[in-house]
Amino acid sequence: MAKKKTINNKPIWKNAGFYFVIIYALLTIAFVAQMFISNIVPIKYAIPVLIVLILLFMGMYYLQLGKRVNKVNKILGKILIVILSIILGVGNWYVFKTTNAFGRMTGNNTQTDVVSVVVMKESNAKDIKDLKGKKLGVIKTGDNEIMTKALADVKKDLGEDITTVDYKSYKDYGDDLYDGKVDAILVNEGSRGLFEDNHANFDSETRKIKEYTYEKEVKDISKDVNVTKEPFSVYITGIDTFGTISTVSRSDVNMIVTVNPKTHQILLTSIPRDYYVPQPCQGGQTDKLTHSGLWGAECTVETVENYFDAEINYFARVNFSSVISIVDALGGITVENPVAFTASDGTYSYPAGNVDMDGAMALRFARERYNLADGDRDRGRNQMRVITAMINKMISPTIITNYSSIMDAIGGSFQTNMTSNEMSSLVKMQINDMSGWDIKQISVSGRGNGSAWSPANGFNAWVMEPDRATVDNATSLIKKIVSGEMITDADVQHQNDLVSNAG
């Protein structure tokens, strides 16, 4: 009589395949959840991906827990689950990096002021306590609220045992420190560059013995639109510092980026840093545009909106560290350089034509003005060339190879008042149609007006008097983009002609 086959009634949790399926199911659920929460994958891709994931899960479940699957197929199933789990793990990581980067860019609504106690390099003072009974200079231009806080903290550290001397001019401020009339001065790190006109080597000839940091929330000045359907403008303000992106400092890069998502056209409008314009944050006084950054991005945006009669929906703040980090994460960029030149500090030479650059080389290229024929105007044009190269690299397929490092760099290098949903919507739109962008570049100009009063400096400084014709025509081109019309090469050439005549 034939022996009866024994039925395997082993509990499911004692089956190793059960745990393979559980791990695979968790990774699948996590990926699907992140895919829809991040909102960067278009529906036309999301639905097929979801169907494929469901079918794959059903197949893996059958290979591990199906009753008619032999031992060989179960082993093959485990191998497949391991391979697919690795792919899902990588996918989860990429989506997480993207949403995390957007959150870091858009979640930081703080403004940071750093105030240092500065002495001459050869000073005997090594610590704040060494200033007891000494003289401390305090500047009374700019943001007095921050300086008042810093002075109170200094007095707290010294038990009020210090004499203060007030100043209204950065020239006198620096001169008296160099001449020994005061033992130390309080310097808001954002305004450190204001010493350069009279003390070019201020950074190397002085040192910090104490630093105070103050953070405050900034109000939301965004003017929200549907960024995938309506035109919008972003103001790029590049501050002249390294390190923390929220640090308040001069706005040395000033650019209006006007985007029409329907026509896929972008207009970059560069504004010289020394443009002499009225500033709301200084009580309507006229000063260099770069000094508006000392009151934060809000002041710079409002100043430009008023002068250009153009609405700016959002801002993006970058600094020196941003350029280096992002360009290096992109694996370098290729910049179209029209004229050969060598940087004034001797670090790099840039031949004419397409130049491959890493982050440090791109930053030096974007900062140079002294060895360029048209000075600050040419610097603005080179800044637009760097941004154009970065955009072109970001929308190219090569971004995939460096995606993780790019997300790390972007997340820590930008501060913007766009929401993470708006950022993800733009990415989703780009993935959906994979269309190229037509990027046009213009600038505005003016005449070097020699020396004029700078309220932020507290003395006369070199400024550029705006040429109204270049401003008005640039505004008309911005409004042309916003109205849905296309900017032509003839439009750009007309603006270039106006700029040439202005110079």
Image (cartoon, helix red, strand yellow):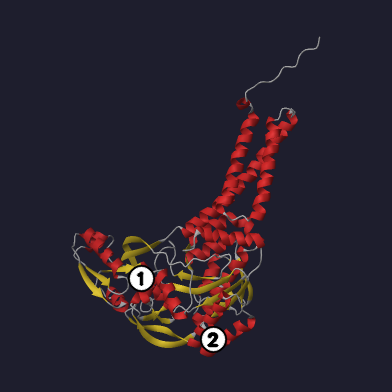
Residue under the image location 61 percent in, 55 percent down: 41
Q: Answer with mark 2 or mark 1, whichever residue precedes in sequence.
A: 1
Please, what is the three-letter code of the amino acid marked with disc 1?
A: Glu
Q: How far across and how far down the image is residue 138, in percent?
A: 26, 71
**Can you tell which quarter of the image residue 127 is in?**
bottom left
Q: CA–CA distance between discs 2 and 1?
A: 39 Å
Q: How far across and how far down the image is residue 66, in percent?
A: 71, 30
Local SS, label 1: helix
Q: Is residue 94 above or below residue 287?
A: above
Please, what is the three-letter code of the amino acid marked with disc 2?
A: Val
Residue under the image location 60 percent in, 59 percent down: 428
Which quarter of the rendered picture does the N terminus lie within? top right
Q: Answer yes or no: is residue 461 visible.
A: yes
Q: How far across and how far down the image is residue 60, in percent?
A: 69, 37
**Can you tell which quarter of the image residue 437 is in?**
bottom right
Q: How far across and how far down the image is residue 316, in percent?
A: 48, 66
Side of 170 relative to 81 (left or right): left
Query: In the image, which is nearer the foreground, mark 2 or mark 1?
Result: 2
**Can you tell which quarter of the image residue 141 is in?**
bottom left
Q: Residues within 10 Å of mark 1 (few under 14, many from 20)?
A: few
- Residue found at the very far top of the displayed protein: 1
Side of 500 relative to 65 (left or right): left
Residue under the image location 24 percent in, 72 percent down: 182
Q: Residues within 10 Å of mark 2 (few under 14, many from 20)?
A: many
Residue at which label 2 appears: 499
Residue at which label 1 appears: 205
Side of 355 relative to 346 (left or right): right
- Residue found at the very far right of the displayed protein: 1
Q: Answer yes or no: is residue 503 visible.
A: no
Local SS, label 2: helix
